[in-house]
Image: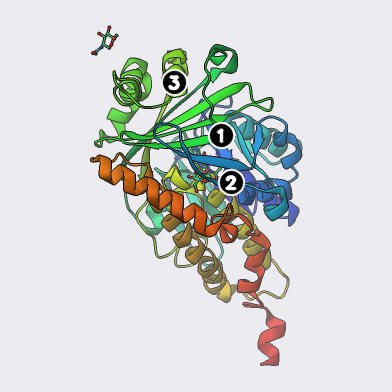
Amino acid sequence: MVQVVIIGGGFAGPVLALSLKKHKISSAIYEVRSKDWEHGGNIALAPNALRVMDSIGLYDEIRSSGFNYQELAFTSGNGHTLGKFLNGSIKEYHYPALRIHRTIVREALRKKVEEVGIPMYYEKKCTKVVGEDDNSATVEFADGEKVTADFVVGADGIHSHVRQFIHPCEPEFSGLMGIMAQVDASELRDIDHGLQLPAMLFGEKGSFAIMPSSFDGKEIGYFATIEQQDRGRDGWAKLETDKDEMAQLLADRFTYNGSTWPEMVRALCEKTPKDTLTSWPFYSVPHMEKFSSPKARVIVIGDSAHAIPPTGGQGAAMALEDASTLAYTLAHSYFPDFQRQYLPQLLEAWEKHRMPRLHQVVDFTTKNGNLRKSSPHYLEQAAKEWVLWTALKMSGETGGAQWMYSYSAEDVKKNIGETGLKTVTTWT
Ligand SMILES: Cc1cc2nc3c(=O)[nH]c(=O)nc-3n(C[C@H](O)[C@H](O)[C@H](O)COP(=O)(O)OP(=O)(O)OC[C@H]3O[C@@H](n4cnc5c(N)ncnc54)[C@H](O)[C@@H]3O)c2cc1C
Ligand SMILES: *[C@@H]1O[C@H](CO)[C@@H](O)[C@H](O)[C@H]1NC(C)=O
Ligand SMILES: *[C@@H]1O[C@H](CO)[C@@H](O)[C@H](O)[C@H]1NC(C)=O
């Protein structure tokens, strides 16, 4: 029997398993999808995400498979530079930012998990947590199998089943969605765009980020953020297969007649091979007071605990930080002189460490999201540009984001302190 059962083999699950392994704790991962499942799209990994990847020995491997950059240029809708913001910095944070295909990261994690001998079972759908007692928790799968372990950790994403055991709730649509794809730079050769890439353009009809996504910078990815009415889970799944409609959504906002977006934006939209278009409705999980069950044997991390919109580029980073900090916490519970009755307090110390940070990141994300919305009036657009310009002027290139990018998961040890350790309770 393994010590920890992990539901979900996305980002948080494998990172937790690999971090636990470093602390000599055994685990197994159960993933609903098949082994060869792939989903398109790129992801940006900020320094705080890369610091976690480094801690499990995977940074060097992924670094050379994506686009490394530090500065992101903010521009107005017509491409005029308003300021620059450091998404990463070797000098400030020891890491640049990395824009990379999601599948490359997943594959690197999968291979590492296999290499170190952590079992990962595919096409295993967890249907519910059966229950917990003082020593263990049990989950059930769609095929009827039940598995018991010391801990059950839900890393099963935004529509989490494990979450229902702790805090039953449904994710809410945020009113924004992303459409993304990539185009080969050779297709764009004749366009004199004058933009410093990567760049984020804030226009009247939404925002448009242009970011290379390959190591050599020759693959140019983009990410359009637009407002949309909720379509429901089935409606969104349908849109994901309807590439024509996605292309039309882009055309209406970025390539209409009389558009003032730079030529580069039009070219990207028009040269996109339609089948590479990917859509992403931004959902968030309602605020949860706790990420662990009453007996602290069932825990949720990553998107299943707190999916946040992508407008701060921190979704994956938060999932990785959760995983790494939880590994320290669970390791503490296996210390020989740890007294089991203190387990709920131990998990509470972990939550107290994570909650304020998550709130701060959500706040940062929401502010960024509001800027990405369309401006109903040109005066509002002018105000938005002015806000961006002055904010960047005042705070400098780091944009006051050191707290976000400098974080180290090991800091959780300070919060945990000596919770539940016998040596301490006998002294006091
Ligand atoms: C298109 C797209 C682009 C993104 N871009 C960025 C970005 O640029 N920067 C950033 O920081 N974040 C980004 N994010 C967000 C980021 O991907 C998530 O925050 C991150 O993947 C969360 O990791 P996770 O492991 O918690 O969840 P997930 O990666 O969603 O993994 C959950 C896993 O659980 C599995 N699962 C679900 N239900 C069950 C079940 N019942 N039983 C077993 N397994 C189950 C799923 O198949 C999945 O593999 C993006 C997300 C999307 C969709
Ligand atoms: C846009 O402009 C082009 C050329 O000026 C014209 O051929 C086309 O019909 C116009 N499209 C719309 C939707 O107005
Ligand atoms: C870079 O910073 C901008 C603005 O703060 C943010 O919207 C974007 O998501 C960030 N990207 C990464 C990779 O952190």
Nearer to us in this view, 148 or 401: 401
Which residue is rendered at x = 55% and y = 36% of the image? Answer: 43
Query: In the image, residue 57 lies at what x, y percent?
Result: 75, 44
Name above or below for residue 417 compared with residue 79: below
Query: Mark 1 and 3 residues: CB-CB less than 8 Å, in contact?
Result: no
Which residue is rendered at x = 71% and y = 48% of the image? Answer: 90
- Judging by the rendered image, the residue that carries numbered circle 1 is 198
- Judging by the rendered image, the residue that carries numbered circle 2 is 87
Query: Could you tell me the amino acid type at mark 1?
Result: Pro
Disc on res. 263: 3
Query: Could you tell me the amino acid type at mark 2?
Result: Asn
Q: Secondary structure at mark 3?
A: helix
Q: Secondary structure at mark 1?
A: loop
Which corner quadrant holds the C terminus?
A: bottom right
Nearer to us in this view, 64 or 161: 64
Taking the image as drawn, is residue 252 in sight? yes
Ligand 2 within 8 Å of the CB at mark 3: no
In the rendered structure, the answer to whether residue 26 lies left or right of residue 164 reads: right
Query: Mark 2 and 1 residues: CB-CB less than 8 Å, in contact?
Result: yes
Q: Residues within 10 Å of mark 3 (few under 14, many from 20)?
A: some
Q: Secondary structure at mark 2?
A: loop
Q: CA distance from mark 2 to mark 1?
A: 10 Å
Name above or below for residue 252 compared with residue 387: above
Query: In the image, residue 260 lies at what x, y percent?
Result: 35, 26
Taking the image as drawn, is residue 1 in sight? no
Query: In the image, residue 217 lies at what x, y percent?
Result: 64, 26
Ligand 3 within 8 Å of the CB at mark 2: yes
Which residue is rendered at x = 24% and y = 36% of the image? Answer: 229
Name above or below for residue 76 compared with residue 139: above
Query: Could you tell me the amino acid type at mark 3?
Result: Glu
